[in-house]
Image (cartoon, rainbow, N blue to C red):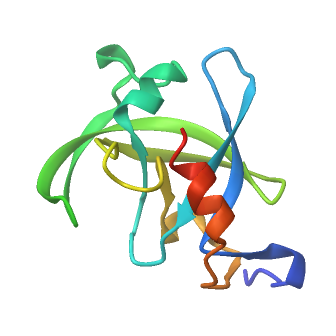
Amino acid sequence: ANKVHSIDKTVKASEEIFVKNKKGKKVLLIAKIDTGAWSSSIDISLAKKLGLYSKSKNLSVRKKISALGEEVRPVIEVTFWLLGEKINTTMTISDRSKLSFPIIIGRVDLDGFLVDPTIDPLKRIKAKKW
């Protein structure tokens, strides 16, 4: 089934998202929309802070090749909202502390969205403060 693409489902290179924490509360974060990444990824310390990651919550591991090199990463379940649309997904865990964004949203979670590659400099500054 083809999804209907509409202007209100256009995302920019960085977007505000809400991530559901362990207690079910929505937490506002800024994510990088990364069409070069297949799957989504979250920083390990942020995942722990949100209560989403512990050894017992680890679903599996996935071998990933990224800008950080080849590594085996834990995989966790995450629920987030992008432009008001609820997305239940799995994300790999990685150390993103030296990167600008604590979360990247990959292609697998962007079905039905159009991507505008414009980078909002204010969102990049806010993202570094996580």
Query: Residue 57, how many percent across, how many down?
Result: 39, 21
Q: Residue at x 44, y 56 (%)?
A: 100
Please tell me whether residue 91 is drawn above or below residue 108 in the rendered image. Answer: above
Query: Residue 69, how many percent across, how many down?
Result: 12, 61
Quadrant of residue 66 within the rendered picture: bottom left
Please tell me whether residue 63 is drawn above or below residue 74 in the rendered image. Answer: below
Query: Residue 105, how many percent across, how many down?
Result: 52, 60
Question: How many badges with numbers are in the image?
Answer: 0
Given residues 51 and 128, the one toward you in this image is 128
Q: Residue at x 41, y 24 (%)?
A: 53
Given residues 85 and 120, the one toward you in this image is 120
Please tell me whether residue 10 is drawn above or below residue 50 in the rendered image. Answer: below
Residue 47 shown left or right of residue 69 in the figure? right
Query: Residue 121, how many percent across, how many down?
Result: 62, 69
Question: Could you tell me which quadrant the C terminus lies in?
Answer: top right
Question: Could you tell me which quadrant the N terminus lies in?
Answer: bottom right
Residue 121 shown left or right of residue 45 in the figure? right
Q: Residue at x 35, y 33 (%)?
A: 44
Q: Residue at x 77, y 80 (%)?
A: 3
Quadrant of residue 27 within the rendered picture: top right
